[in-house]
């Protein structure tokens, strides 16, 4: 039964990582930038959600939508202000800028809300419930997290595969210059990619707050890093790779905790990453093709 | 489809156009003009600046000096400051010398993407139009299939672009450029890497496209049989400078051209 308990825990943790990893991988796919500020967008989303629920007394779903909208705008602003001017400079310049944006978001948030953690409001009603099947405890909030995550992933897949902007994203990820000459507004396409990726991070932030309760301005660091690991793990730039990697990281982490390695669970995650990259340098699903996004 | 071309006269004019990269001059003081409906060749030795002219015309680089004017019906655009996608919307389509397909996407999607983006749209409408374009999907797919059929690629619609043989990739580039609904089509070495039979087919196809879609075509080509066969006029570029222009037979007998270009080829042979 212990195995099944870790399975459900891993599934809900992996769902949150997946939402974050999707943003990493989409941005990488389209402009080959590791957006190190992505975890901090999650943090901002968590605070927007917290503010919406405590000060504005919204319900969970309204708070989730508000956080997603706020993060979408934040993502577009970050891209236009910080990354777009560096589009044609070296990759390392953009990477360092991303680290700068990350620190900026962390300490601006700290200036406004203080360094002390805030607590998400207690879950009520259905959310607070749990049930037991053959000794496996399943919290309702875990099911809600998994459900919302899967729903968002399906919506994302529909956007990428079926819509004009989604097709533009795929074209830009293959050859931005050719896409431009085929009538695709590449700047707008990149903005939409940041908006979508950041909205997913915002949703992940709110769910992180609901699940772990405590939030602080530096909270984005570790989930951001692990989602990055997940994206690399699956093959960076590939959406299915990000999903596979995220659930793998979620399971590895919960299993490490389950077998009594709680203190070292993060180390185990990174160790597995190193092993995977030694065996498959392009990640689990990575090939030497250029299919991204 | 190109019913917007209502006036006779020049569709494209380059006056005194120069393009410098640092100290290097890729294109120097070039004057060119294309009349509506013309099929014009642009030839010259490697590194003569032919592709640089295409890049100027499609907004990849703005000219260092000089003026590029594109006239479509009553609408006159100065291409100098325009973004590549806006130039595409204005009615100029192109192919690439080194094939630049969306390699890992299916053949049909290469065409559909170009079809879906051949009209202006803003960031807001990119989201709002999403649903409408969902409904238009079938219409877009049908038109894409028709373009593929014209180019002889209908059986490869679901193949990944990168898996097509070279000659078909070249034809897919043309299909994709046609999907942007151009009135002026720029073909950058469309026959490169093709065998004589494929080149002959392509020559016929280019003529057919021009007639049936009312296109004006400017083409860069090294294959002299193709150029001499279908071009009405030819411009010859060498070291970024226009050294001659005229009908194919005039060009074939122009001493400067023979020295700069044909002579070089004869020496290689």
Image (cartoon, rainbow, N blue to C red):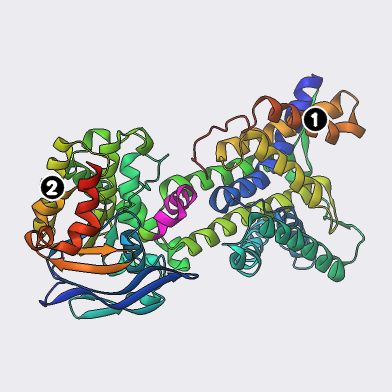
| Residue B171 rendering spot, x and y as whole percentages | 24, 44
Q: Residues within 10 Å of mark 1 (few under 14, many from 20)?
A: few
**Number of the label disc, if any, that sits on residue A271:** 1
Q: Nearer the viewer, residue B214 or B225?
A: B225
Residue appearing at x 80%, y 50% in the figure: A221
Which residues lie in the magenta part?
Answer: A165-180
Q: Is residue A13 above or below residue A169?
A: above
**For the point 54% across and 62% down, which residue is it?**
A191
x then y, percent, for residue B132: 35, 58
Circle 2 marks a residue in which chain?
A: B
- Rounded to the nearest angstrom, the CA distance separating label 1 from label 2 is 62 Å
User: Quadrant of the image for the C terminus of chain B?
Assistant: top left
Depth check: give the residue in front, A123 or B249.
B249
- Image quarter for residue A84? bottom right
Q: In this figure, which residue is indicated by the disc labeled 2?
A: B225
Q: Secondary structure at mark 2?
A: helix
Is A115 rendered above or below residue B134?
below
Q: Is residue B193 left or right of residue A208?
A: left
As drawn, A166 above or below B152: below
Which is the main secondary structure of the residues drawn in magenta? helix
- Find residue A286 and report its horizontal and vertical position in percent: 57, 33
Q: Secondary structure at mark 1?
A: helix
């Amino acid at each position: 039964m212990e195995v099944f308990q870790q399975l459900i825990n891993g599934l809900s943790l992996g769902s949150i990582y997946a939402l974050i990893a999707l943003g990493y991988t989409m941005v990488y796919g389209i402009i080959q930038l590791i957006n190190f500020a992505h975890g901090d967008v999650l943090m901002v989303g968590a605070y927007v959600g917290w503010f919406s629920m405590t000060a504005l007394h919204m319900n969970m779903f309204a708070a989730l939508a508000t956080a997603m909208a706020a993060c979408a705008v934040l993502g577009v602003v970050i891209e236009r202000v910080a990354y777009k001017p560096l589009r044609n400079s070296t990759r390392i310049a953009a990477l360092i800028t991303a680290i700068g944006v990350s620190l900026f978001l962390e300490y601006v948030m700290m200036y406004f809300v203080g360094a002390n953690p805030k607590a998400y409001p207690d879950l009520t009603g259905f959310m607070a419930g749990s049930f037991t099947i053959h000794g496996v405890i399943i919290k309702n909030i875990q099911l809600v997290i998994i459900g919302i995550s899967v729903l968002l992933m399906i919506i994302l897949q529909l956007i990428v595969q079926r819509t004009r902007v989604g097709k533009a994203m795929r074209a830009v990820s293959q050859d931005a210059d050719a896409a431009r000459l085929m009538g695709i507004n590449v700047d707008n396409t990149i903005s939409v990619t940041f908006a979508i990726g950041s909205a997913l991070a915002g949703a992940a932030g709110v769910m992180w707050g609901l699940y772990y309760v405590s939030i602080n301005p530096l909270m984005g660091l570790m989930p951001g890093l692990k989602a990055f690991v997940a994206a690399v793990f699956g093959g960076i730039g590939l959406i299915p790779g990000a999903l596979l990697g995220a659930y793998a990281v979620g399971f590895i982490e919960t299993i490490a905790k389950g077998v009594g390695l709680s203190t070292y669970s993060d180390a185990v995650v990174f160790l597995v990453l190193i092993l995977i990259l030694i065996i498959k340098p392009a990640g689990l699903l990575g090939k030497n093709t250029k299919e991204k996004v | 489809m190109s019913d917007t071309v209502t006036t006779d006269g020049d569709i494209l004019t380059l006056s005194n156009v120069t393009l410098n990269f640092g100290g290097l001059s890729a294109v120097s003081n070039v004057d060119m003009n294309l009349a509506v409906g013309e099929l014009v060749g642009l030839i010259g030795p490697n590194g003569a600046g032919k592709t640089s002219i295409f890049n100027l015309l499609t907004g990849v680089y703005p000219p260092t000096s000089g003026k590029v004017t594109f006239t479509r019906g009553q609408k006159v655009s100065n291409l100098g400051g325009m973004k590549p996608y806006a130039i595409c919307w204005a009615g100029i389509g192109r192919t690439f010398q080194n094939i630049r397909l969306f390699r890992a996407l299916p053949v049909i999607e290469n065409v559909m993407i170009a079809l879906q983006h051949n009209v202006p749209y803003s960031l807001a409408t990119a989201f709002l139009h999403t649903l409408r374009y969902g409904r238009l999907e079938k219409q877009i797919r049908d038109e894409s299939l028709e373009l593929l059929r014209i180019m002889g690629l209908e059986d490869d619609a679901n193949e990944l672009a990168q898996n097509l043989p070279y000659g078909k990739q070249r034809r897919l580039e043309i299909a994709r450029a046609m999907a942007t609904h151009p009135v002026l089509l720029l073909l950058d070495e469309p026959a490169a890497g093709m065998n004589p039979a494929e080149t002959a087919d392509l020559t016929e196809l280019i003529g057919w496209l021009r007639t049936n879609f009312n296109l004006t075509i400017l083409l860069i080509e090294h294959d002299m049989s193709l150029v001499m066969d279908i071009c009405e006029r030819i411009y010859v570029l060498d070291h970024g400078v226009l050294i001659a222009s005229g009908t194919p037979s005039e060009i074939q007998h122009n001493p400067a051209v023979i020295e700069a270009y044909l002579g070089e080829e004869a020496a290689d042979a």
